[in-house]
Each structure stands twice: as C-alpha cells, then as structure tokens.
Image (cartoon, rainbow, N blue to C red):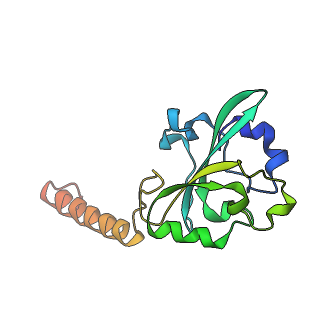
Amino acid sequence: MSPYLEHQYMYISHLYRRPMSFTPKCDQSSFDSRFLNWKNCSDLCVILKMNDRLGGRRREGYLRGCMSDIIHYNQTLSALGATNACTVVRLRDLFISTERYLFENSDQAQLCACHSDLCNLAPSTISIHFLIYLIYFLLIFFVIFAQNFNFYSS
C-alpha cells in the first residue's frame, strides 16, 4: 500500500485489511516488485488506485493484494476477474452497506482485477514438483560428474 496511507490507516482500517507493507515501490510511478511482499490470492488479485484529496492536493494511493483485502466488497465485482480488466468504480458500488461509510456519488477508485499468473505484476510461483525434479537431476549430475573425475575415495 502507498506509504502516505499508513498515516491514514486508522481512518480506513474498516475498509481495507492491513497490508504486508507500506512502500513507495507499490505506487505505479516507482513500482518494483522486488521490494514487495507476495501472497497467494484464493479469490482475485487486485490493484486498487485511489485518488484522494488531502489538504487541497490530489494524491494517488495504491493497494496491491487480494480482493479479500477489501473488507465487505460487493461480490458482483468478482466478475471483473474473468476479463482481466480495469474499471473505474464508485466507492458506493465497491462496498456493501455503503450507507455506513458516507461516500459521495463522485468518490471513485480504479479497480484492476485478474486471476492468471503475473497479472498483478508479481512473478509466477514455481511448482514444488518442478523443484523436486530439478534437485533430483542435479544430484544425478553431481554423482556422475564425481564418478568420472574420481572425487570419491574407494
């Protein structure tokens, strides 16, 4: 999540789960996945871009994570994941029970949602089976290499 939102988190904690980190590397202008924590999402991977006005200045804030990190989100938005698309949503439409949150009609955010590997700009995970086969073949290679060069003492 964008670092300026860390100072505002106490005011938005009822809307979003606490992120693994607050870092400028999450922002689009300085995004670098090497500095972000990764997690598997059982629902959708999302990028939520918020445009806030703070002290008369407009700021962009980013949340990168899972759809379930958005507390009480509107389930109809899950259809976005099938299209791997971004859309502008009214905050009133993003959350259920919005009468509690006092959002105005003009309050919006950009929501990008997807299901596939690399869709949230994180590297894909390597399967455990691939790692087992890789280790197995490296061990065989080492044994053959060692036998050919007599590294064993008999």
Q: Is residue 9 left or right of residue 26?
A: right
Q: Residue furthest front?
A: 105
Question: In the rendered view, does 89 fall on the left or right side of 52?
Answer: left
Q: Could you tell me residue 137's position as x and y percent?
A: 25, 66
What residue lies at 17% left-to-right and 56% top-to-bottom? 150
Kindly tell me whether residue 60 is visible in this rendering.
yes
Q: Residue lying at the far left in this picture: please name it.
A: 148
Q: Please tell me which residue lies in front, 13 or 140.
A: 13
Q: Hey, which quadrant is residue 130 in on the image? A: bottom left
Q: How many marks?
A: 0
Q: Which of the pair 114/23 is nearer the observer?
A: 114
Residue 57 pos. (x, y %)? 71, 27
Name the foreground residue: 92 vs 143: 92
Q: Position of residue 41 (x, y in %)?
A: 56, 65
For residue 42, say whether it is visible: no
Residue 27: % across, % down: 57, 38
Q: Residue at x 69, y 51 (%)?
A: 19
Quadrant for the N terminus, please: top right
Displayed quadrant of residue 9: top right
Q: Looking at the image, is 123 positioned above or below residue 67?
A: above
Q: Quadrant of the C terminus?
A: bottom left
Rendered image quadrant of residue 102? bottom right
Residue for point 84% across, 46% down:
11
Residue reaching furthest to the top: 56
Judging depth in this view, the residue of 54 and 146 nearest the camera is 54
Residue 80 is left or right of residue 15, and the answer is left
